[in-house]
Image (cartoon, grey):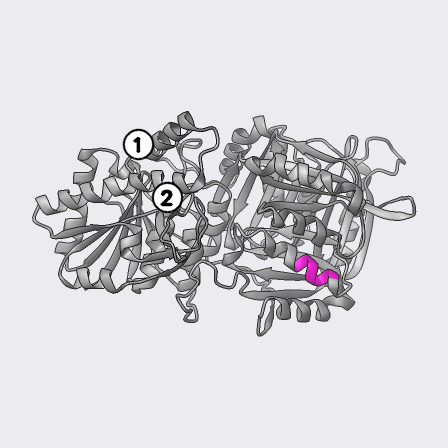
């Protein structure tokens, strides 16, 4: 007999008929000899309706009262589903987050789970009852009892956390699509269903805007080894399994606040090539990396910085043994990229003897201070950062090779990591190179001109943002260095969520004079499109294929950043959907079946 946690989202319980259908599915699972805990969201658009009511009363509702209001949505659902189960002869009991014993930090509207008391749950399960739990909510760990909510995706988070606390055999997430698809079926109806996906791939896709699973839920699944499957509540299709490697046992104390960084990784044999002042037009990145891929040369990090005038800088890293070949290709193609013959455009700059150091961990998502702590740690050791590349599960910095050992040591100490590891470079043929394509239209770009190029500046900049709880996504440091008033300076660009953009611009502008940087420029008319896949490691030409798909459709790339399993490009906001569609088609991810999302 298995212990299963099932979660049903708002559309799955959006009407009396749907609640009754869910009751039948739960009953069928119990009749197969399983014990079941069910976590549910509020019905349909209930939460939106409650928010609307609050906004009619107040332009800025008190966060405590919002938690009190919004927590009622799930309570309606748990009572109705318990009644529906009882009507068909299945003993059931409904419990709120507080009654279950979901203890959270005292942060209204965005609390994280600290612990879960399972005694009452197990007592009801042992009596043969289905326990129906209100997702999205808990109770604070303060002396005064306070209802808290977990924020967006909170029901997913509740379900996986309960599965971890109960040591459940697996957790099923029921939604309005048949599983995890290669992209959003609302934008590409021919998106294909994946039978399985790794936690790291899912973390990237979830954080990029794929709404099937919330990143916090995937983070818990990875950290505690919870088998996870996403299925449709409308069909009996098998869905998609989210797999995670075997993990060491973790204490269930501070469940969502556990150590955010699991490892420090390094590659001591990297070299950087930069093409300075390449034309800012479609096709440049495709041409460059197409030629490199044609020579079967594998590229690691790629960044394209913000443009100055009508040019950009593109930098990339390769392993030292293939540096000469990569340099020859870049030097050969540079003249073809110039607007004018014999100009200083597309200058090739080579920096040997560099190393990549990275911090990795599923707990980094949504924690603004993690990257800032890495930068501050390196700065305190006097180590300057040459390149920065970020993803949802990793932050990588390129440093001088002579500083590699010291960087590893200070990062291990700062994040309490016992040992470091080299970054694996062997091809992963177990999976296709690209598993999914995601579009994030909730990003805004900030650019800071003339940031002093000295150790500690990145730490101060991103530390300032973390103090105001602002999470940063892409980070790009320009390759061109200009000397102003005797100080070498670079531009830094990064993306943040739209809701944080104006606040970030305001705080950075306030500190500009004190910290010595220039104008802070905000651009909201952007979209980020990304490819994700564990199989792209060690396979040349993946990024080039993405860039070529955009170039063939005259879509200009404004920024590029990469990790081992992700390539992201910033494009104009009005070209975002088209970019997603052409990239999805370029990698052959479309299938013959069309998925229609229930309304």
65, above or below 218, in the image: above
Instruction: Give me the residue at 87% from left, 33% from top.
Output: 341
Residue occupied by mark 1: 598
Query: Where does the image place residue 113, in percent across and percent down from the top left?
Result: 41, 56
Is residue 366 toward the left or the right of residue 252 in the image? right
**What secondary structure is found at the residue carrying circle 2?**
loop
In this view, the residue in front, 430 or 530, is 530
Q: In which quarter of the image is the N terminus?
A: bottom left
409, above or below 16, in the image: below
Q: How crowded is mark 1: few (under 14 residues within 10 Å), some or many (20 or more)?
A: few
Q: Quadrant of residue 397?
A: bottom right
Instruction: Give me the residue at 65% from left, 48% from top.
Output: 293
- The kind of secondary structure the magenta stretch mainly shows is helix
Query: Where does the image place residue 170, in percent across and percent down from the top left?
Result: 30, 59
Residue furthest to the bottom in view is 418
Q: Which mark is residue 508?
A: none
- Magenta-colored stretch includes residue 534: no
337, above or below 266, in the image: above
- Magenta-colored stretch includes residue 376: yes
In this view, the residue in front, 477 or 578, is 477
Query: Where does the image place residue 489, in percent across and percent down from the top left?
Result: 83, 46
Give the magenta part as a residue range: 374-379
Query: Where does the image place residue 560, in percent across and percent down from the top left?
Result: 65, 42
Number of numbered discs present? 2
**What secondary structure is found at the residue carrying circle 1?**
loop
Instruction: Give me the residue at 70% from left, 54% from top.
Output: 459
Which of label 1 and label 2 is nearer to you? 1
Q: How crowded is mark 2: few (under 14 residues within 10 Å), some or many (20 or more)?
A: many
Residue occupied by mark 2: 193
């Amino acid at each position: 007999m298995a212990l299963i946690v099932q979660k049903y989202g708002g559309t799955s319980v959006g009407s009396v008929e749907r609640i009754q259908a869910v009751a039948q599915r739960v009953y069928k699972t119990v009749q197969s000899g399983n014990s079941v805990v069910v976590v549910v969201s509020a019905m349909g658009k209930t939460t939106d309706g409650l928010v609307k009511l609050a906004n009619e009363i107040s332009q800025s509702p008190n966060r405590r009262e919002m938690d009190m209001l919004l927590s009622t949505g799930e309570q309606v659902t748990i009572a109705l589903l318990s009644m529906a189960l009882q009507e068909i002869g299945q003993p059931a009991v409904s419990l709120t987050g507080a009654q279950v014993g979901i203890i959270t930090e005292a942060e209204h509207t965005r609390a994280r789970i600290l612990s879960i008391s399972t005694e009452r749950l197990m007592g009801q399960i042992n009596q043969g009852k289905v326990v129906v739990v209100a997702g999205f909510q808990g109770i604070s760990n303060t002396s005064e009892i306070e209802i808290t909510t977990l924020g967006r995706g909170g029901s997913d988070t509740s379900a996986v956390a309960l599965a971890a606390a109960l040591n459940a055999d697996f957790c099923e997430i029921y939604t309005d699509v048949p599983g995890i698809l290669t992209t959003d079926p609302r934008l590409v109806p021919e998106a294909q269903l994946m039978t399985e996906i790794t936690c790291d791939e899912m973390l990237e896709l979830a954080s990029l805007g794929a709404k099937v699973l919330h990143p916090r839920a995937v983070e818990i699944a990875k950290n505690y080894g919870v088998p996870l499957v996403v299925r449709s509540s409308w069909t009996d299709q098998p869905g998609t399994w989210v797999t995670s490697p075997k993990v060491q046992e973790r204490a269930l104390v501070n469940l969502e606040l556990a150590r955010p960084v699991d490892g420090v990784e390094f590659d001591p044999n990297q070299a950087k090539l930069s093409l300075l002042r390449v034309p800012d037009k479609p096709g440049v990145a495709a041409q460059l990396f197409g030629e490199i891929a044609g020579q079967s040369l594998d590229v690691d990090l790629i960044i394209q910085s913000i443009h100055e005038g009508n040019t950009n800088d593109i930098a990339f890293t390769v392993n030292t043994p293939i540096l000469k070949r990569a340099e020859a290709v870049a030097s050969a193609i540079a003249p073809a990229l110039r607007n004018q013959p014999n100009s200083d455009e597309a200058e090739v700059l080579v920096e040997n003897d560099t190393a990549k150091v990275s911090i990795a961990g599923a707990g980094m998502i949504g924690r603004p201070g993690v990257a800032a702590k890495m930068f501050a740690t390196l700065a305190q050791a006097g180590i300057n950062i040459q390149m920065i590349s970020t993803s949802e599960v990793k932050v990588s910095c390129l440093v001088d090779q002579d500083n590699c050992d010291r960087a590893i040591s200070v990062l291990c100490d700062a994040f309490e990591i016992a040992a470091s590891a080299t970054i694996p470079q062997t091809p992963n043929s177990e999976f296709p190179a690209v598993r999914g394509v995601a579009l994030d239209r909730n990003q805004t770009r900030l650019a800071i001109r003339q940031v002093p190029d000295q150790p500690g500046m990145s730490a101060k900049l991103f530390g300032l943002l973390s103090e105001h709880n602002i999470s940063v996504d892409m980070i790009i440091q320009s390759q061109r260095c200009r000397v102003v008033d005797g100080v070498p300076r670079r531009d830094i660009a990064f993306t943040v969520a739209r809701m944080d953009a104006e606040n970030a611009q305001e705080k950075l502008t306030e500190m500009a004079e004190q910290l010595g940087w220039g104008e802070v420029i905000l651009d909201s008319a952007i979209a980020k499109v990304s490819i994700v896949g564990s199989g792209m490691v060690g396979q040349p030409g993946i990024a080039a294929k993405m860039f070529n798909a955009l170039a063939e459709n005259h879509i200009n790339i404004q920024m590029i950043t990469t990790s081992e399993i992700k390539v992201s490009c910033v494009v104009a906001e009005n070209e975002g959907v088209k970019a997603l569609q052409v990239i999805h088609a370029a990698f052959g991810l479309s299938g013959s079946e069309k998925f229609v999302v229930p309304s």
